[in-house]
């Protein structure tokens, strides 16, 4: 996309929201500023986010990949803040230099349609590619909650309290956080250093070791 001013897409957000109604959230992200990426959101009651909220961990993990097979991900399952099932789609936006600068996201609340499954089966269909292991996308209203959610999930995956972790476990934890793109968020490294009880330079040293592998 030659035009880097993502604001030209704002009318599309409003138009889609009015087309699909209150059960469909439309979000426009400026991924050049991932910690405050939302520049337009409609029907935000579904996820509780607002202008300036961060990108999701799912978007960050994709943004952190060097080569994406495609620029859109359609029909993957997520959950709203109250636990409602959502059908989500993410479309990445590139500039003239082929760099991803934004994303347009669509989140449809399936709850009202489940009782009309026979009539609305098409709109409720979840993409088969995501039925076995749904990506754990989190709709955090601010960067602190996003970092806390991802960090907590990664610590639980290690299966050991931070106080009992050796260097190997901490490296595994840092590696997973890097893979999830959490270090793209400003201040994340400092937050992780406090949680692990190590210095900020140590976190950067761990990241260097991971990059060398």
Image (cartoon, helix red, strand yellow):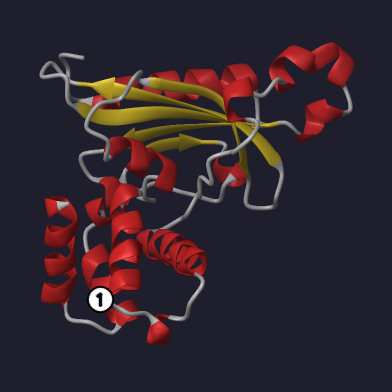
State which quarter of the image contains the N terminus: top left
User: Which percent across, then down, holds residue 49?
Assistant: 49, 49
Residue 172 sits in which quadrant? bottom left
Instruction: Name the residue at 48% across, 77% down.
Output: 160
- Badge 1 local density, few (<14 within 10 Å), some, or many (20+)? some
Nearest the viewer among 150 and 23 is 150
Nearest the viewer among 207 and 101 is 207
Nearest the viewer among 192 and 28 is 192
* Residue 210 appears anywhere in the view: yes
Instruction: Name the residue at 39% across, 87% down.
Output: 163
User: Which percent across, then down, holds residue 50?
Assistant: 45, 48
User: Which percent across, then down, holds residue 162?
Assistant: 40, 81
Instruction: Name the residue at 44% across, 62% down.
Output: 154
Q: How many marks?
A: 1
141 lies left or right of 211: right
Nearest the viewer among 161 and 169 is 169
Give SS at disc 1: helix
In the image, residue 176 sits, relative to residue 41, either above or below, namely: below
* Residue 127 appears anywhere in the view: no
In the image, residue 50 sits, relative to residue 119, either above or below, namely: below
Residue 66 sits in which quadrant? top left
In the image, residue 70 sits, relative to residue 26, either above or below, namely: above
Residue 85 sits in which quadrant? top right
User: Which percent across, then down, holds residue 115?
Assistant: 89, 28
27 lies left or right of 169: right
Q: Which residue is mark 1?
A: 193
């Amino acid at each position: 996309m030659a035009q880097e001013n993502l604001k030209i897409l704002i009318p599309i957000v409003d138009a889609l929201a009015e087309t699909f109604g209150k059960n469909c959230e439309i979000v426009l992200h400026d991924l050049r500023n991932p910690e405050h990426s939302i520049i337009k959101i409609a029907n935000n009651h579904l996820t509780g986010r607002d202008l300036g909220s961060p990108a999701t961990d799912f978007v960050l993990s994709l943004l952190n990949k060097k080569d994406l097979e495609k620029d859109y991900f359609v029909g993957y399952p997520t959950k709203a803040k109250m636990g409602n099932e959502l059908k989500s789609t993410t479309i990445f936006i590139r500039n003239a230099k082929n760099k991803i600068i934004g994303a347009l996201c669509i989140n449809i609340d399936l709850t009202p349609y489940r009782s009309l499954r026979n009539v609305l089966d098409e709109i409720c269909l979840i993409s088969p590619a995501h039925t076995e292991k749904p990506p754990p996308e989190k709709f955090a209203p601010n960067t602190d909650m996003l970092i806390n959610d991802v960090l907590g999930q990664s610590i639980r995956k290690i299966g050991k309290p931070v106080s009992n972790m050796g260097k190997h476990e901490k490296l595994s934890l840092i590696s997973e956080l890097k893979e999830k793109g959490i270090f793209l968020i400003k201040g994340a490294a400092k937050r992780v250093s406090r949680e692990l009880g190590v210095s900020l330079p140590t976190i950067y040293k761990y990241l260097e070791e991971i990059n060398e592998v």
